[in-house]
Image (cartoon, helix red, strand yellow):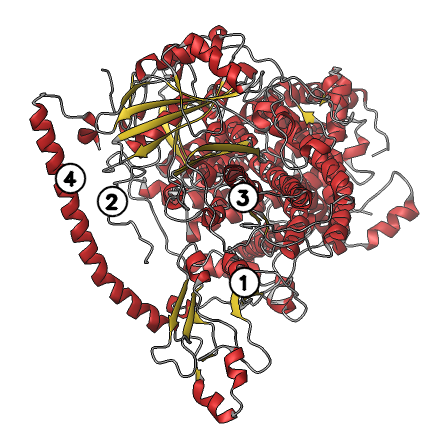
Amino acid sequence: MPADSVLPPAESVATPEVLPPPEKHVGVGGAIHGAVPWIDKSGAVGGVFRAIRSLFGGMKITGGYLMRPSTVVTQQYPENRETLKLPDRFRAQLAFNHDDNGYHKCTLCRICEEACPNVSIIITGREKPAVSKKELDSFVWRLDSCTFCNTCVIVCPFNVLRFDGTFESSVYDRRLLSYTLNQYAGPVASVLEKLEDPEARKAAMEARDPYSGAAIIAALVEKQKATKIAERAAREAAKAARVAAKAAAAAAAAQPEAPPEAENVG
Amino acid sequence: MEAPNLIAAVQALQPDATVRAQSDRPTLIVPAHALVALATRLRDDPALRFDLLETHTAVDWLDEDRLELLYLLTSVPLGHHLTLSVSVDRDAPVVPTLCKVYPIAEWLEREAYDMFGILYDDHPDLRRLFLEDDWVGFPLRKDYEDDFMLERPE
Amino acid sequence: MSVHVSTLQARISGESTASSPLSTEEYFVNMGPQHPSTHGVLRLVLRLDGETVREVVPVLGYIHRGIEKMGEHGNYRQFVHLVDRMDYLSALANNWAVTMVVEKAAKMETNDRIQAIRTLVCELQRIQSHQLWWGVFGMDLGAFTPFFYGLRDREQICDIFEKTIGARLTMNYIQPGGVMYDIHPDFVKDVKAFLTYFKSKMPEYDALMTENVIIQERLRGIGKLSAERAIALGATGPVLRASGVAHDLRKSEPYGLYSQVDFDVPVGTTGDCWDRYWVRMEEMRQSVRIVEQLIDNIPEGKTFLVKPAAKIKVPAGVHYSHVETARGVLGVLLVSNGKDAPYRIHCRTPNFNNLWCIGEMATGGRIGDLVATLSSIDIVVPDIDR
Amino acid sequence: MSWPVKTIAERTGDLLPGSPWTASVYVLLTILAVTAFMTVTGLVLIYAERKIAAHFQCRLGPMRVGWHGVLQTIADALKLLLKEDIVPRDADALLHILAPVLSFAGMLLVMIALPMSPSLQVADMNIGVLYVTAVSGLGVLGILLGGWSSNNKWSLLGAMRAGAQIISYEVSATLALLVVVLFSGTLQLSGIVQSQEAGWWIWRAHGCGIVAFAIFLIAGTAEINRTPFDLAEGESELTAGFHTEYSGLRFSFFFLSEFLNMFVLAAMTSTLFLGGWMPLHIGHFAVFNGVMDIIPPGLWFTLKTTAMIFLIMWFRWTFPRLRVDQLMRLEWKILLPIGFVNLFVSAACVVTGCYFFAR
């Protein structure tokens, strides 16, 4: 162990004292409620018998569970689907709070989108709002990148989002993990309720399919790709300029110095 | 020991140590060359007894072109804390190692080398800790870039 | 200047230093990254002389995710959920560490109800972490059954968390400014039921493992770490306490409501595997005591004191605070430049330092001792790699 | 009541002069029957182990394939048959392939000497005990070869541990066997069973029997590499020990031979110490003995063997594993001296000719 050559001899390390004990500390390791007497009283023959007894003590525990099938805790999952109850707060799937009419209250404030730590929420507004100024087109939630941190739910000022317990969300194609949460594209509940005419309401709303999120994300990715390439070129140019400036400064200093080793080893 | 007394006591050991502003624990800026001697005395001084190097890491101040090394010391028996701050040049970051004073520094310094490229003089086993030996660049530097970095779309 | 950058290959291709008069040959073995008892993707390169371990060279980074770098790219509230993924068995304590440093730096207020809930859930999580450790420890020593008993009892706490928090492992519950939800109406009842249940199970734990002669023989005198070396090597938590140093942040720098509850700090004597085992078993009992004292005395009050969507501004400077997780001291070093995102955030994780002791503990023992020692440190690999 | 022993080998011998063809068909059928019996026993044991382990651990175990998962083992066997057969590139291919076969063949050979009932025994050698001890040692050869030929350090470690362990514990097991041989005065397995008509050796032998029984059980458990002596494959230490590099069918051979080893151990323990197929008799209590005789000998054998198997499983699902040096210490410093003393005491008993119950 090369550490030996590095470390100082044990004496040179300051000897620590036990912290000033505010109250008591529990005593010495081993004296656990008088449960393990046999090892401390090391009478040879008695020790052996106590040792054997300790083995039987363990067998009594396991044997006891074998004899009592009621202690089995296994849940047989697909069979117990009907009786399986998950707690209300269980975070399995993000969902929109739609009211009884099927209207939501999302005003496109994008607070949740900003609060999301891993960009799992993508909100797009309608290009041509029907009634109000800003209308939700699609609220896409990406289960595949979500970490279920619940931040979007607590930051939402209008209580639009909730997590519910439908946990059976496995699919064979991960594009299907991008859900469109809103059932319709259109104005919020309060605006819709102001419209007296049911036909007008219907005209303002456009149904949304839960699985239309993949296309939206694909379009977004295409758009970002182009900007990213441009950004990268700009960054690289800036970096080259900085390096050149530095080299010039070094040359100006005219101080021949060995190049830093970090560059060589990296 | 209370913070003002502590700072005074350390400054008695190292007169050119200055107090770093903006820190919630007593923090002293010390020159790199004095680090090992000071740490040894901090550890062995019966009134100070900083026997635990709680953590050690670096901060990349890109705008000021320096790396700030922070050593967080704790005294287990006396229960007080001290932070040492050492600044080094970003391009040639060489500092003496604290391995001989605090053995745990061996790993902490390897991590700092791995992430910031700080070279520790006299370190017995200076190599990458988390990344592979042939990794290019030091990821926690502010100007680090690589092809795998994902950026948050704005 | 004598800076020399080495490589892993150079590190493990040293000359054989066989000391046996019989000319045995030492050899290197990779234990991990996929090995049942490295608890994840830890890799230990062992230099073996027959069955005897001559050297342990840990190789890290197989689950390094750059949490510190990710932290620089999001705001403070967004960083909290990342630390769940470090030590996933102490996710709440990790949340609390970040929350504490942010609250301290940004001078955010809390009330007693928030602190009581935080203390309660952290202690419950300490129990469940130790339960899982107990099971895994048995598994590493070759006994399969404790694993299931430990997990079965841990499930009860997970169910309590599921009701109150909504998650079982990565909770993101303790937030700057409060806790994410108020406790569930059933919380007090459930916790009391659990305590009754758990107190009836502790004797079974003892009968199955603690008193077992094989366990005693396997653990006594194995993997010793003296108090001086433990501190010098930066060990904290049960590893340090087993060596005889009563360093527990819950006592020495009380946070939350720890100053108001009565509990003891179990301390070992020799720092061997048995002491570490015993310290953890005793800590479970102490945590039960803490929960018992707090569960009937949760003060009234609000549980979230700020607007969750509000940006948190931390004044420029270096901020540090630490908590005692189930494995030791978790410190969060926050360097701020006054913006709403951390300039640099560093986590001092307990497992990182505790693992560093493995070289000292396991050298000279057998492979079986190495496994027992590694398990008695109770490593969680994502906590090491971050 | 006398127990006429008629083995399958003897029946074949009777047939041989008259019709050699019938006799050879008989032999073939016997071979098939033994193999089939072993396979079925292995499958049943694997299922039983999984179910029993599950209930020790508050679980249910396999529940899906068939009623309460009874077909699970067959499904697993089919899966193993269909898996890719991998021989590592740098392995010694011939030995790698040979090892599981050897390990299995050892078991097969032991099987023919086991007296399951007066009429159900393949061959009744007059050196049966010696034969079983010798042939069961063949299993370690398979383990050693498997570990060595895999060209994997973990496998090698496991194989070396297994070699050291099995050879060491063989000594104690044999010493314990000798106690019974001394008392019964014969090496023939059917003779040993018949010598227990007045009572089983476990209690009839003045305490020497129970000590020998304990030693034999411990040493036997160590020989078959089961917890708490499963160092050879110690999952948490050596990943899987000697069979780390095995997959598919070859792995299943190792797996099956491990379970059959357990059956052989249980059968030998019950034969030597618990009277084998002999019903429970107590001295001269004729009425009691008569009642016991109603239960057929085959069932007695099955019951005793099942009880022993259950005990071994119970050990496995309760105890942690020993360390390698403790394992050796247990053998050479504890079991072996006790075994020797036990042997001397029982020899003295036999010489003085005192038994708890008359022959």
Which mark lies nearer to you, 1 or 4? 4
Q: Position of residue C345 (x, y in %)?
A: 41, 38
The reply to whether dot 1 and dot 4 touch (C-beta < 8 Å) is no
Task: Tell me the kind of residue under disc 2.
Answer: Glu
Q: Judge the density around disc 1: few (<14), some (14-19), many (≥20) Cα neighbours within 10 Å.
A: some
Q: Are marks 1 and 2 on the same chain?
A: no
Work out how far the residue at label 3 is from the one at label 4, CA to CA, in angstroms. Answer: 39 Å
Q: Which residue is mark 2?
A: B145
Front label number (3 vs 4): 4
Alpha-carbon span between mark 3 and mark 2: 29 Å
Q: Are marks 1 and 2 in contact (CB under 8 Å)?
A: no
Picture disc at residue C95: 3
Q: Secondary structure at mark 4?
A: helix
* Mark 1, residue position: A92
Residue marked by disc 4: A242
Q: Amino acid at mark 4?
A: Arg
- Residue B109 vs A80, above or below: the answer is above
Q: Secondary structure at mark 3?
A: helix
Q: Quadrant location of residue A5?
A: top left
Q: Quadrant of residue A143?
A: bottom left
Q: Chain of mark 1?
A: A
Location of the C terminus of chain A (image quadrant): top left
Q: Give me the chain letter of mark 3.
A: C
Query: For numbered disc 2, what is the local secondary structure?
Result: loop
Identity, as a three-letter code, of the amino acid under mark 3: Asn
Where is A75 relative to B24, above or below? below
Q: Residue at x 72, y 43 (%)?
A: A62
Q: Is residue D186 visible?
A: no
